[in-house]
Image (cartoon, helix red, strand yellow):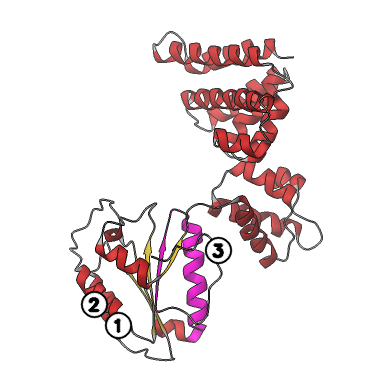
Amino acid sequence: MAAPKSANLSISKPLAPIYLLFGTQDFLIQLMKKNITKEALNDEERDFNYSRYDMTEVPLEHAVEDAETIPFFGEKKVVIMDNAYFLTGERTKTKIEQKIDRLEQYMEHPAESTILMIVASYEKLDRRKKIVKKLEKTAIVYELSHLTDTTLFAILENVAVQHGARYTKEGHEQLTAAIGPHLGQLANEVGKCALYCGADRPIDAQVVEEIGSKSLETNVFLLVNQVMHRKTTEALQLLHELVRMKEEPLKLLALLERQFRIVYQAGYYQKAGYTQNNIAGKIGVHPYAVKLALEQTRLFDAQMLEQALEKCSETDFKIKTGQADKVLALELLIIAISSKAA
C-alpha cells in the first residue's frame, strides 16, 4: 500500500486516472479538487466535461457510467464523486444503496480520458473494507487533515501572493493565535489583510491586530490578560461585551478556566526545561499561544494560578447549583482574581 500524500498540494504529471481525497480540512480538499480540475481542463472544456455527483443522493453507477463515456469536447473529462461515505465507518442518512462492485470493476480498467476524483471529507477511512484497500493500491491518495505549521504558513503565504501582498511569520503567529488552526477562516483573514495592505505594506502582527477578526478564545485570552494586569474595569467591560454578543456565561467560565490552566501548565513545563514547541505538544495548543502564556506567567506565580483555578471551580459550582446569577458570579470572579494579581 502506497503511503497517502499529506497536505502537500503539488500535483504530479501526467495526471492519474483516479484520485482519492479524504480528511477533515475541507478548504484543502476544495483547493485540491480545483487544482486537479485546472490541470485537466481549460475553462471552455470545463463547461462540457466536468461532472459532480453526491454519493448520498445519487447511485455511484451514474458517476461510473459518466467516467466511462468519452469526453464531448476536448481530450479529458473530470468526474467527482463527493461524500463517499461508503469508504468510512460513518453512518449517513441516505436511502441510496451503493453498488460498490461497480466502482471496483471500473478501477480495474479506468478510462484513459477521465480523471475520477473520489472525495471523502471524513477523518478516517475504514481500511477493513475491500474497496478502500483497492483504492489505496490503485489511486493517488491525499490525506488532507493534519497540517504542520510550516505547511499552513506556506498555504497562507500563497493566498497572500495571489492578492499581491506579502505574508510574514510575525503576522502568521498573531493570526493563528487569534483564529486557531481553521484553514478556511485563516485564508479568508489573509485575503482580507492582503486587500488592506496591498503591495506596499507587509501583513505583520500589527496589521492582524488592526483589522483581523478575533475568535472567542482570543477574547478570553485578552480577558485573562486584563485580569492579570489588574485592569479590572476593562475586564468587566469585555465580559459584558461578550455577554451582549450572546456568549453563554458558563462557556466563558470554562474558557477562562482553560486559559488559566494553559498558563499554569506552560509555566510548569518551562521550569522543567521544556522548549516552547515541546510545551505546545504537551498541552495541545499552538506554539504562539504558549509564548503568550509564558509571558503571562510573569504576572501570576504557580500558587496564584492554583487559587484562580479553585475560584473558577467554586464559581462553576455556584452557578450550576443556582446559588448565584451567572453574570454576577463571573463579575465577582474577575474582581477576586484581579485583586490578587501582581
Q: Nearer the viewer, residue 252 or 8?
A: 8
The picture quadrant where one finds residue 281 is: top right
Q: Residue at x 23, y 53 (%)?
A: 93
Badge 1 is on which residue? Answer: 109
Badge 3 is on which residue? Answer: 8
The picture quadrant where one finds residue 64 is: bottom left
The answer to whether 337 is drawn above or below residue 217 in the figure is: above
Q: Tell me which numbered mark, 1 or 3, is placed earlier along the sequence.
A: 3
Q: What element does badge 2 sit on?
A: helix
Q: Which residues are magenta?
A: 17-44
Q: Residue at x 20, y 71 (%)?
A: 101
How far across and how far down the image is residue 34, in percent?
50, 71
Badge 2 is on which residue? Answer: 105
Say what amino acid the circle numbered 3 marks. Answer: Asn
Say what amino acid the circle numbered 2 marks. Answer: Gln
How far across and how far down the image is residue 174, in percent?
69, 43
Residue 23 located within the stretch drawn in magenta: yes
Say what amino acid the circle numbered 1 marks. Answer: His
- Quick check: marks 2 and 1 in contact, CB under 8 Å? yes
**Whether residue 125 can be seen here:** yes
Q: Residue at x 70, y 29 (%)?
A: 294
Q: Give the spatial CA distance, label 2 vs label 3.
A: 30 Å
Q: What element does badge 1 sit on?
A: loop
Q: Give the spatial CA distance, label 2 vs label 1.
A: 7 Å
**Whether residue 328 can be seen here:** no
Q: Tell me which numbered mark, 2 or 3, is placed earlier along the sequence.
A: 3
- Crowding around mark 3 (Cα neighbors within 10 Å: few <14, some 14 to 19, many 20+) is some
- Crowding around mark 2 (Cα neighbors within 10 Å: few <14, some 14 to 19, many 20+) is few
The answer to whether 169 is drawn above or below residue 230 in the figure is: below
Say how many tags the image has: 3
Q: Is residue 11 left or right of residue 275?
A: left
